[in-house]
Amino acid sequence: MSQRTRATALLAAATLALAGIGTIASTSAQAAAGCKVDYAVSSQWGGGFGANVTLTNLGDPLTSWTVGWTFSSGQKITQAWNATATQTGATVTARDAGYNGSVRTGGTASFGFNASWSGSNPAPTQFTVNGVACTGSATTSPTPSATPTPTATPTPTATPTVPPPTGTTPLAINGQLRVCGVNLCNQYGKPIQLRGVSTHGLQWFPACYNTSSLNTLANDWKADVLRIAMYVNEDGYVTNPAGFTAKVNDLVDQAESRGMYSIIDFHTLTPGDPNANLENAKTFFRNVAARNAAKKNVIYEIANEPNGVSWDQIRTYANQVIPIIRAADPDAVIIVGTRGWSSLGVSNGSSSAEIVANPIAFSNIMYTFHFYAASHYDNYRNEVRNAASKLPIFVTEFGTTSATGGGTVDIGSSTTWLDLLDSLKISYVNWTYSDADESSAAFKPGTCSGSSYGTGQLTQSGQFVRSRIVTPDSFPTS
Ligand code: IDC
């Protein structure tokens, strides 16, 4: 391009840009607004209560928000998280916390608060977002060129609390998970089972988690969940906290963009006492919970396999880490490791009775059970069967092999195990989606240095596990 043509082109671009600014200014006055606010008291005690508030943006994308309402019975906010709340008289204004200010069309943002009450505690019924009353629908200011067509008035009975799924992925269908009774439930309150795989140690197999392998996992294996095994010691997190935190966050995004859930696994193994990593856990979970609070695909696993410690010591650890996660991400499911390498105590001569007698006193908690099919047989199965009617259990790790991760692949025992978990609707995750040179790995050694993760690359274990995960899910929506 000659100097002259180039100057003309620049001038044209500048003119277009100016025209663009003019257009934006004139349309922003007519930005579609619309919102829905869900307000739910999560717990209430004498004189106090906690509540979660979720705003659904039904208008144009927001870059910041305030949610407003008026209390009718003297309630007073004492503390808020994921928003800054101010209260003048009965009028509350909750402003986004910065990191959750952007909400796409159809997206949600949540925050929570504690408040005092006396007499009665009625929920507010009218909310505003950025000063606009929330009617549960979108409105656009009429413009001469684009008069909106009138929409049918919604009938009260036809307004479901949770709208139907907007997609077909596990995440789109099930949305925000929660624990109901002993089950993992979806956004419709229906029990579901998630089936998926675990990474190997991120420090050892970074090459195995890339666009191609994750596409294979979501599209070919039809996995529902990816467990992100972030070892803490053993050359893991402690060697580079910021780097491993970023890697975990990236994999959360990768899973989300493919419609899968992700389990953030703080993979403590050696030492077996999670309290040895308490400060690391606090820092790590404070960061990942704040960063991922608005996402619906995150499940937190706070200690992989406690060993050499009592259930009481595990509880002590959990009681310090859970509030940190909750402060940032109040509604996520949190999974707590159990005694004896997450064997519900069995590998230490104990049982789930110690957990039932002394459970974790937070809501939305599940308990970890792990098994290796060539090491753990009927006495472990009996314990799972027994515990399943009393505790919400999540199998965040199992192998088809011995507990070393190697040795013979026991297809018979693996089949018995997975049939049992299917019948109990217990979610499970296989160790490992990697090409480690050990029989529990799903891919043959060397696979991750190539570009194909097809069935030709699968090991015996990988073929079996894929065949169990690929079958259709059952995700009830009504
Ligand atoms: C194993 C890996 C192996 C690695 C070892 C490190 O398969 O390559 O050398 O960890 O300690 C678990 C643990 C999990 C183990 C796995 C198999 O959660 O970290 O991975 N296992 O031994 N519990 C029971 C078995």
Image (tube, rainbow, N blue to C red):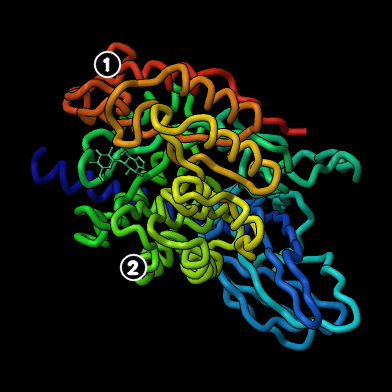
Label 2 CB less than 8 angstroms from ligand 1:
no
Q: Residue at x 17, y 48 (%)?
A: 7
Instruction: Locate the N terminus and report the quarter of the image it occupies.
Output: top left
Task: Give the crowd class for mark 1: few <14, some 14-19, many >=20 residues within 10 Å.
Answer: some
Q: Residue at x 59, y 62 (%)?
A: 330
Tell me, for residue 276, which label it has, or none: 2
Q: Quadrant of residue 462?
A: top left
Q: How many marks?
A: 2
Residue under pointer 1: 457
Q: Is residue 345 left or right of residue 89?
A: left
Q: Is residue 130 left or right of residue 432?
A: right
Q: Is residue 430 above or below residue 471?
A: below
| Whether residue 257 can be seen here | no
In the image shown, does 162 or 382 lie closer to the viewer? 382
Q: Quadrant of residue 442?
A: top left
Disc 2 marks which amino acid? Answer: Ala
